[in-house]
Image (cartoon, helix red, strand yellow):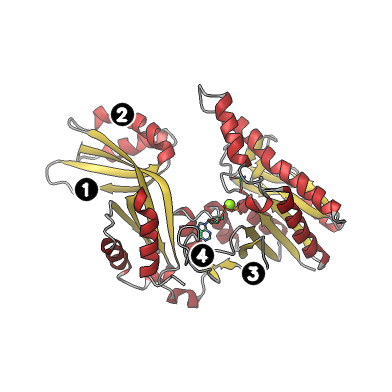
Amino acid sequence: MSLIVQKYGGTSVGTPERIRNVARRILATHREGHQVVAVVSAMSGVTDNLLRLAREVSPEMPPSERETDVLLATGEQTTIALTAMAIQALGGEAVSLTGAQAGIETDGVHTKARIAHITPGEVHRFLKDGKIVILAGFQGRTPEGFITTLGRGGSDLTAIAMAAAVGADLCQIFTDVDGVYTCDPRVVPDAQKLEEISYDEMLEMASSGSKVMQSRSVEFAKKFGVIFEVRSSLNENPGTIVREETMSMESVVIRGVSLERNQAKVTIASVADQPGVAARIFGAVADANIVIDMIVQNVSKTGVTDISFTLSKADFESAERALAAVLADLGPGAKIEAQDGIAKLSVVGIGMRSHSGVAAQMFKALSSADINIQMISTSEIRTTVIVDEPQIERAARVVHAAFGLSA
Ligand code: ADP
Ligand code: ASP
Ligand code: MG
């Protein structure tokens, strides 16, 4: 008998019929003689709808983050009850647990709480009684008992953290695609499913836009050595195994391509080239709780320079406001230039550590498609460029093909 943690995402539980399908799958695993904890997300669209409602009742100010968590947690709470009912209707014994009831304790950072620890006593008790445990993804509670959520896509994290806490033999992330592909199959139709991918590659892909896994969940899996499989809830095909890298993984130079839309770029032109200027710019942005991404500062020959950075389009206006407030301290001629409508394209692979020429090959592919590169950044296993958003899908396809990833 094994202990298996499964996770079913929003599309997989998006309709009553889909919930019945998930219930049948969970039940089949249980009837093979395994203990099962199934983490479920809110039905697809529900979290977005709840966020819309919150904005509608609070147009004057951003809705309070504490109350946002109370609201969003209802999405997953609906699905656990429905899934447990569906299993019971099919003759199985299931019990639903919220994150709090399952002992998931977090810090108090509402809407993006971090898991502090898990006390899975209740989970073990129900499993020992022969019950299937249906666990609400994406949520936990503070030490005081307040409801928190774990950031968008956070049900992945619930599954991986619970798998670590209960010492699961297997962790399966069921979604609406057959696994992790060389690129989002909705953008690059000839992308190929990967048999395996290392934690580091999955992490870089997730944090550069491949939303198939929440990046924090991959970080957690790496830290605690949770091997997991990403696979489809709609068929029986084997999925993609995510785990620590092996020697053979290094021979592949580029594992995948990811893209992220809805990016924006801010340039502060003609700032004084002297100590403290960058600190003032990024201090102001950080104080406004804005996460920034790529930073580029030009070489200065004249005592002034330009500093550019990218960020999510959603934070664009607050960044402009924050910078306008400190502009006078940045030099006499300093001015802000802001642009949205850009997107980010990355190639990722641990083989980049030992192979040269990846960036050149990527730039050549883009140039042959007449796509202009606006900014460039790299890590040890990733090269990223910024291009105009309308060109991002074509850019992904040409780069994907140039690295021989197409089927
Ligand atoms: P779930 O609701 O199951 O959590 P998500 O919508 O969060 O599912 O993630 C699955 C989606 O991720 C797929 O439908 C696919 O469009 C997208 N995706 C982006 N990049 C990739 C990739 N490299 N491989 C597979 N899917 C990807
Ligand atoms: N329902 C949450 C979201 O839409 C969590 C998840 O689906 O993983 O982000
Ligand atoms: Mg997801």
Residue at disc 4, CB closer than 8 Å to ligand 1: yes
**Disc number placed over residue 237 in the picture, else none:** 3
Image location of residue 91, percent across then percent down: 87, 56
Q: Nearer the viewer, mark 3 or mark 1?
A: 3
**Disc number placed over residue 181 in the picture, else none:** 4
Image location of residue 189, percent across then percent down: 48, 63
**Disc number placed over residue 298 in the picture, else none:** 1
Badge 4 marks a residue whose secondary structure is loop
Q: Nearer the viewer, mark 2 or mark 3?
A: 3
Residue type at tag 2: Ala
Label located before the other in sequence (4 or 3): 4
Badge 2 marks a residue whose secondary structure is helix
Image location of residue 325, percent across then percent down: 32, 27
Neighbor class of circle 3 (other Cα within 10 Å; few <14, some 14-19, many 20+) is: few
Q: Nearer the viewer, mark 1 or mark 4?
A: 4
Residue type at tag 4: Tyr
